Image: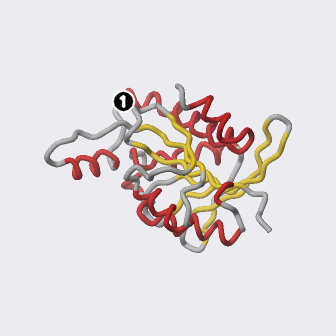
Amino acid sequence: MASDFWLIAGLGNPGSKYEGTRHNMGFMTADVLAERWSVNFSDHKGLALLGKGVMNLDGRNQKFFLAKPLTYMNESGNAVASICSYYQIDPDHVIVIHDDMDLDFGRIKVKAGGSAGGHNGIKSIDRSLGTPKYSRVRMGVGHAKRGANAHDNTVNWVLGGFGPDQRKQLPDFLADGADAAEEIMFHGLAKTQEKFNGR
């Protein structure tokens, strides 16, 4: 019997040296949701920080788990799959929030399925869940310089922090990402795409 819980997983890397980096957009958005819905995190099998809450929107209640995997980005799937199997959550009730270099900073795209777009966290979740058919809130962080050292540039970029302008915009951007996750749960993917993808 599938659970009526949703799982929202915000991706990132644990540890203070990664705090506030582009790759931790998912963690930061999860923190906004945690604050918004009074979720307290505790340890899930050493794989994730996991909390449980109830959202109340439009007169409806929705129970959800909120996760921040502690497995490092490339093994995110281990944490997500463990929570899904433990609480019997189907992929169509999973929402993953992650950074996306193919989108400019401040842009959000919502999708389900499709390619991982080179994102190792998403590749890991696809593998562990055995399907790409879960919802994704893609948070744009812009792109590193291409060229000779493209790979190193990319790594340094996603593990880098935000400039002063972006830091000013960050609270609103994270709030939008949190809104997008809520919207998927309450109004479905298609409606959420109409609202966010055209921006």
Instruction: Judge from the rendering whether residue 26 lies leftward or rightward of residue 157; answer left or right.
Output: right
To which residue does mark 1 refer? 164
Residue type, numbered disc 1: Pro
Please, is residue 175 above or below residue 26 in the view? above
Q: Position of residue 113 (x, y in %)?
A: 54, 51
Residue 124 higher or lower than 161, as above or below = below
In the image: residue 156, left or right of residue 103: left
Q: Viewer-proximal residue, 24 or 190? A: 190
Q: Most extreme residue toward the bottom, as rendered?
A: 45
Quadrant of the snapshot with the N terminus: bottom right
Question: x and y percent of residue 36 in the render?
Answer: 68, 41
**115 displayed left or right of 5:** left
Residue lying at 47% horizontally and 45% vertically, measured from the top left:
25
Query: Toward the viewer: 114 or 33?
Result: 114
Tell me the quarter of the picture where residue 187 sits. top right
Q: Please give the name of the residue rendered at 42% of the width and 43% of the height, measured from the top-left corner.
A: 100
On the image, the x and y values in percent for residue 60 come to: 84, 41
Residue at left 77%, top 53%?
63
Instruction: Measuring from the top left, give residue 96's x and y in whole percent.
Output: 56, 51
Outermost front residue: 114
Q: Nearer the viewer, residue 130 or 96?
A: 130
Residue at the spot 65% in from the left edge and 66% down from the top edge:
84
